[in-house]
Amino acid sequence: MRLTTRTDLALRTLMFCALNPDLIVRKHEVAERCNVSENHLAQVINGLAHKGFVTTLRGRNGGLRLARPAEEIGVGSVARAFEGGVPVADCFATSRAHCPLAASCRLRDALARAVAAFYDSLDTLTIADLVEDNHGLEAVLSMAMPMDAGCGRAVAAG
């Protein structure tokens, strides 16, 4: 199973917000720290807000923050929200022509069970689980850490 780029960016954005809980973060800060396009990220942030994962604030001091505590945002629910319409195989896509193997194929049911198990395993995690005591992630995503202008990465103050 492979996550789409949107799901990946959604999870990165949520982790970024979770590691900067007292700040209203800006899209360009997330894009810079996560090394992603601001335009692509804007679409993801819009989806996160629409699905109730973040709150966005407009204006000069605008930005985004988590809509609820990181402990209450399940990784599985984020993945489902962004992956829900992506079929795992062609036989799961409603727009595809009817598969001639459908009447005898056992693969579809096996894939359905595998996808369910994938989401079930993600349901055991929250955004808080991904960021708590994760010093490596904090070094990259925390706004308390200065950025190294040469490589676009956070560096420890020393």
Image (cartoon, rainbow, N blue to C red):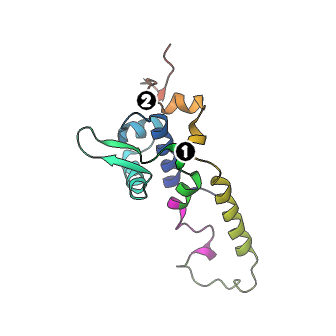
Question: Relative to 102, does residue 142 appear above or below in the rendering?
Answer: above
Indicate whether residue 34 is drawn in magenta: no
The answer to whether one can see residue 143 in this image is yes
Magenta range: 81-93
Among the two numbered marks 2 and 1 on one chain, the one whose residue lies closer to the N terminus = 1
Identify the residue at horizontal 74%, vertical 80% (top origin): 105
Identify the residue at horizontal 44%, vertical 25% (top origin): 144
Identify the residue at horizontal 46%, vertical 44% (top origin): 13
Q: Residue furthest left?
A: 60
| Residue 10 appears left or right of 98 | left
Picture quadrant of residue 43: bottom left
Q: Nearer the viewer, residue 38 or 150?
A: 38
Q: Quadrant of the N terminus?
A: bottom right
| Residue 122 appears left or right of 141 | right
* Element carrying mark 1: helix
The residue identified by callout 2 is: 143
Give the residue type that dot 2 points to. Met
Residue 54, position in %: x, y?
41, 49
The residue identified by callout 1 is: 71
